[in-house]
């Protein structure tokens, strides 16, 4: 049985520290990965045996256990409405994933800081393992099962899926654990018959909702508890930190037609969210470079967790690389990749004039048709293509302006403008003809 109720004593024992600090690797997923902490090339163990498993929900809750309290109530047998002596200590369950992995969850709720009593107000901004578990089960149900397979688990009116939410809402711990076990039993059966693998293959890439959930799981296990460190940048500098939210990234993917054969780059990738989302949703090759040490370290951490989680979900990863460095410097793999790139993102909202100007020079090496998404246009509003300007980098760019709306970016609730420039040298032909006759 994979879901177990643990005694309180057992739950209070210290967490195993095996994956305390995610290992620092910068793999191209699918390419050779250095998985031992020392990077010992003499390690001849088969890759399977050193593959790192995902960071379990249980682990991150334990790291902040002063912020969690029991959620489920113990009830008298036969009387589902009357709590006994207050909340039961805690429950632990394991949830089966589509691809032969399980994740362990402590069924606790996050409470507001400095809450003393056991039934303190829930902190809705903090990671909630029960919500994560239910959302994960819902997405396995929605995305990995055919309608006839879904019938084995019921729906939101009856059966296992209904029981998950019903027992959560009624704070009935034993009922909830039983529903998770029943869910696991069905998933194990479908997995051993090969059905889940077949369904995952047919899906090819996770849809937007599933991608967002997987990225949320990754972030909550690798970055969330240390996110304050991201505010450590010089104000009004190029390193001002801000993120494009997933809803706008989805729009970028659609507008620039990124597919599994595309090469995508994020110049100034921060913690790598955009790179991971684009790679997950499309299966493309994705590259991110970041000059600041902390966000780049988090990007690499997220990538490791991404590789483990995508494997658990039975989904392909795409080929992803993160680099620590300056996108304007030569000697890293920015420039060779730029020449192959189909789509670039430059979140240059806070970049100074020199940086934007130098980036525009780099764009001269881009291939025809490459699209550059940016928050400030690389082409000045008053730019006119003529004999005097046709040699300037911005003259090879055809720009379109778009609007984004609230919740699209992390630094404001308001809407704003973004730009997609397409490399189009054909516009220069008349000028070359006029000057050189060809
Ligand atoms: C606003 S954040 C964008 C993060 C991510 N691309 C997004 O849109 O969600 C811009 C990032 O660019 C980085 N950056 C600025 N200049 C850079 C340079 N010359 N090379 C690499 N990264 C740079 C900053 O440190 C910052 O993390």
Image (cartoon, helix red, strand yellow):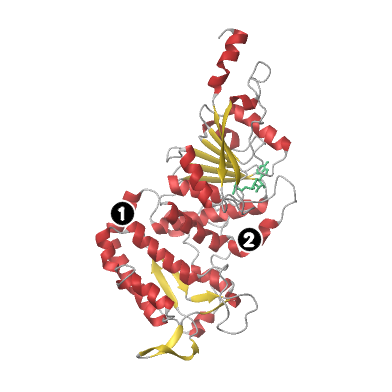
- Estimate how packed mark 1 is, as few (under 14), some (14 to 19) or many (20 or more) residues with alpha carbons within 10 Å: some
Q: Is residue 223 above or below residue 157?
A: above
- Estimate how packed mark 2 is, as few (under 14), some (14 to 19) or many (20 or more) residues with alpha carbons within 10 Å: some
Note whether residue 51 is visible: no
Q: Residue 199 carries which label?
A: 1
Note whether residue 173 is visible: yes
Q: Which of 286 and 375 is in front in this view?
A: 375
> In the rendered image, which quarter is residue 354 located in?
top right
What residue lies at 30% left-to-right and 61% top-to-bottom?
Answer: 191
Q: In this view, does 153 lie above or below 435?
A: below
Q: In which quarter of the image is the C terminus?
A: top right
Q: Nearer the viewer, residue 30 or 199?
A: 199
| Rendering coords of residue 39 (x, y %) | 56, 53
Q: Which of 353 and 282 is in front in this view?
A: 353
Residue identifier under label 2: 227
What residue lies at 58% left-to-right and 49% top-to-bottom?
Answer: 244
Q: Is residue 183 above or below residue 391?
A: below
Q: Quadrant of the N terminus?
A: bottom left
């Amino acid at each position: 049985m994979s879901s177990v109720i643990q005694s309180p004593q057992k739950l209070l024992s210290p967490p195993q520290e095996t994956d305390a600090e995610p290992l620092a690797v910068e793999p191209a997923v699918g390419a050779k990965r250095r998985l031992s902490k020392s990077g010992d090339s003499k390690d001849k163990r088969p890759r399977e045996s050193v593959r790192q498993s995902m960071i379990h929900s249980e682990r991150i809750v334990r790291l902040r256990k002063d912020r969690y309290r029991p959620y489920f109530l113990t009830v008298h047998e036969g009387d589902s409405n009357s709590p006994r002596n207050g909340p039961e200590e805690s429950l632990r369950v394991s949830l089966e994933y589509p691809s032969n992995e399980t994740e362990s969850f402590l069924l606790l709720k996050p409470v507001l800081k400095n809450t003393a009593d056991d039934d303190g107000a829930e902190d809705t901004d903090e990671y909630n393992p029960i919500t994560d578990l239910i959302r994960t089960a819902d997405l396995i149900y929605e995305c990995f099962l055919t309608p006839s397979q879904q019938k084995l688990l019921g729906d939101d009116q009856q059966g296992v899926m209904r029981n998950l939410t019903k027992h959560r809402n009624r704070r009935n711990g034993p009922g909830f654990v039983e529903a998770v076990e029943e869910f696991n039993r069905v998933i194990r059966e479908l997995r051993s018959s090969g059905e889940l693998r077949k369904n995952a293959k047919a899906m090819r890439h996770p849809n937007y909702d599933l991608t967002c959930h997987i990225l949320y799981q990754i972030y909550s296990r690798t970055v969330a508890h240390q996110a304050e460190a991201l505010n450590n940048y010089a104000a009004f500098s190029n390193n001002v930190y801000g993120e494009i939210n997933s809803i706008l990234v989805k729009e970028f993917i659609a507008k620039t037609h990124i597919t599994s054969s595309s090469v995508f780059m994020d110049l100034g990738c921060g913690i790598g969210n955009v790179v991971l989302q684009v790679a997950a949703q499309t299966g493309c090759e994705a590259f991110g470079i970041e000059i600041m040490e902390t966000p780049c370290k988090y990007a690499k951490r997220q990538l490791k967790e991404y590789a483990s989680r995508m494997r658990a979900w039975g989904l392909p990863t795409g080929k992803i690389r993160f680099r620590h460095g300056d996108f304007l410097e030569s000697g890293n793999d920015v420039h060779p990749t730029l020449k192959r790139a189909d789509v670039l993102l430059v979140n240059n909202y806070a970049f100074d004039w020199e940086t934007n100007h130098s980036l525009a020079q780099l764009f001269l090496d881009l291939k025809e048709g490459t699209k550059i998404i940016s928050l400030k246009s690389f082409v000045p509003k008053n730019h006119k293509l003529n004999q005097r300007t046709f040699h300037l980098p911005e003259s090879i760019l055809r720009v379109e302006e778009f609007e984004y709306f609230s919740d699209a970016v992390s630094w404001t609730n308001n809407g704003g403008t973004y730009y997609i420039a397409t490399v189009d040298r054909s516009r220069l032909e008349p000028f070359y003809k006029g000057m050189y006759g060809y």
